[in-house]
Image (cartoon, helix red, strand yellow):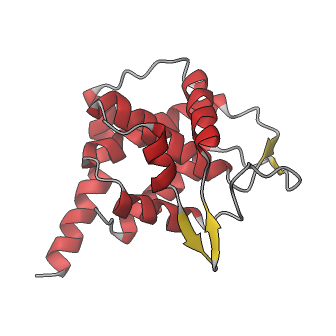
Amino acid sequence: MPFSDTILDYLVQKTYNAIPRNARLNTSVQPIGSATPPPLRNFISHLSREVNVPILTWIATTVYLDRLKPKLGSTRETLRCTAHRIFLASLIITAKYLDDDYRINKDWEKHSYMRFNHRLSWFTLGDINLMELEVLSLLDWNLTISALEVYRRSETFFNSRHNVMSENI
């Protein structure tokens, strides 16, 4: 389900907010299988078209992103694809936890595959397995999400969807 600009901006903002602003970009390390990553907004937009998960999954993903912020506060270095990794791992974990999603990580590897500036950008199965375990560890394996946590974040999604619908009438 492709998202409105408002929802994409919200997801991008939530992802970047999880990463410490003072972390230094480490350009010497590049994950295996990843070319220069596309802009995060393009990556999330691509996933929204590729992955058929309920809107609740996207909303709940932001709960995990918010929980990661204090855990990543001491991070000193990031990679060019850190935001992409955090977002994708959070989405995978949310889909598996809330939806009992049938996808295996090999499927998510295919979903992450996209073309950007005539180059391929993707995460390998090894990348996805590792980032999923890293995010689960950072979350202390606590995946419980309350209805209140989802409700607080849902306004952005539903208001922007309503605005898009009313603009098209």
Q: Residue furthest right?
A: 28
Task: Give coordinates of residue 80: x percent, y percent.
Answer: 73, 56
Can residue 5 be seen in this snapshot? yes
- Figure label count: 0
Instruction: Pick out the residue farthest to the left.
Output: 169
Quarter of the image holding residue 47?
bottom left
50 or 151: which is nearer to us?
50
Observer-nearest of 84 and 24: 84
Residue 69 visible: no
Q: Position of residue 136 (x, y in %)?
A: 54, 25
Q: Name the residue located 43 percent from the left edge and 46 percent from the top edge.
A: 107
Answer with left or right where residue 163 lies relative to residue 2: left
Residue placed at 51% from the left, 68% from the top? 42
- In the rendered image, the quadrant that contains the N terminus is bottom left
Location of residue 62 in the rendering, given as x and y in whole percent from the top left corner:
43, 42
Q: Hey, which quadrant is residue 157 in on the image?
A: bottom left
Q: Residue at x 47, y 60 (%)?
A: 44
Judged left or right of residue 47, residue 109 is right
126 over 84 or under it: above or below: above
Q: Give coordinates of residue 144: x percent, y percent.
A: 37, 21
Q: Quadrant of the C terminus?
A: bottom left
